[in-house]
Image: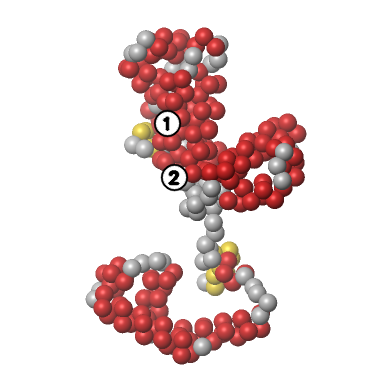
Amino acid sequence: MKYEKVKISGINTADLCVLTDEEKEELLIRAEKGDKEAKDKLVLGNLKLVLSVIQHFNGRGPSADDLFEVGTIGLIKAINRFDRSKGFKLSSYCHPMILGEIKRFLRDDSPIRVSRSLKDLAYKAMQAKEALIKKNKSEPTVDEIAKELGEKRCDVVMALESVSDPVSLYEPVFSDSGDTLYVLDQIGDENDDETWLNEISIKEAIASLTQREKKILNLRYFQGKTQVEVADQIGISQAQVSRLEKGALDKIKDGI
């Protein structure tokens, strides 16, 4: 998916301007002297650079709006720190700053609390992976990444796993003719015979419930709604939802 000619964070990307090298140079000189308007124009004139960076993170979880805002923060930081005397092009200096800001956001936005040292190792491992891909033109193994960092393989694996998005047990993995297979269905244990017998019993117990009871359990335990939200959706009181929910669970327990 590309983000040109769409609206992100209230900004129509089709209307974004692109500065010429002469315009950038003039604005940089003014910005160095404390001209806030020049600095604002530099930011607006380089927002397309932010767009080009966030395209690489499509499907990583956060919305395009969130990534665009975070990338813009990286752009502002880069413009504030840019030194013309070093001889770098502004875009060459801003790109890694924008990229780094987004990666830090993705690293720190994990729904599971992970220690700072583990996050730092994961970030170094991702950087090492990118460097090895650029150097060898192929995807590196975990062993190669660990060797590059001088770390143990198990530590690198744990670090990378710690910043991966968790998968819900109810994440669908296959669907055919209305029958959906979830991650939970793929999990086995040492008591497989007992497990499938229990599963049959549970399915039979659930089949004996009324449509209203099934709907309440679906809303409560599969969609994560509160009893008040369920009551509003079905059109009954919260007390009735509580009673029906308890009765349905008792029926299932008695049927197993």
Give the total number of marks visible in the rendering: 2
| Disc number placed over residue 236 in the picture, else none | none
Check the image and report above or below for 238 versus 47. Answer: below
Are there few (<14), some (14-19), or many (20+) residues within 10 Å of tag 2?
Answer: few
Observer able to see residue 191? yes
Q: Are marks 1 and 2 in contact (CB under 8 Å)?
A: no
Residue 194 lies, in percent from the top left, at 63, 84
Q: Mark 2 points at which residue?
A: 63
Q: 44 or 3, which is in the foreground?
A: 44
Specify whether 109 is left or right of 182: left
Specify whether 162 is left or right of 133: left
> Disc 1 versus disc 2: distance between alpha carbons?
16 Å
Observer able to see residue 4? no
Residue 10 lies, in percent from the top left, at 34, 36
Specify whether 121 is left or right of 144: left
Residue 101 lies, in percent from the top left, at 49, 34
Check the image and report above or below for 229 versus 30. Answer: below
Mark 1 secondary-structure assignment: helix
Tell me what residue is drawn at x 67 percent, y 36 percent: 128
Residue 209 lies, in percent from the top left, at 41, 85
**Extreme-bottom residue of the structure:** 254
Tell me what residue is drawn at x 40 percent, y 79 percent: 214
The type of residue carrying mark 2 is Ser
Tell me what residue is drawn at x 67 percent, y 38 percent: 129
Mark 2 secondary-structure assignment: loop
Q: 219 or 116, which is in the foreground?
A: 116
Tell me what residue is drawn at x 44 percent, y 45 percent: 63
When asked about the image quadrant of residue 8, the answer is top left
Check the image and report above or below for 237 versus 94. Answer: below
Q: Mark 1 points at which residue?
A: 73
The type of residue carrying mark 1 is Ile
Q: Earlier in the sequence, mark 1 or mark 2?
A: 2
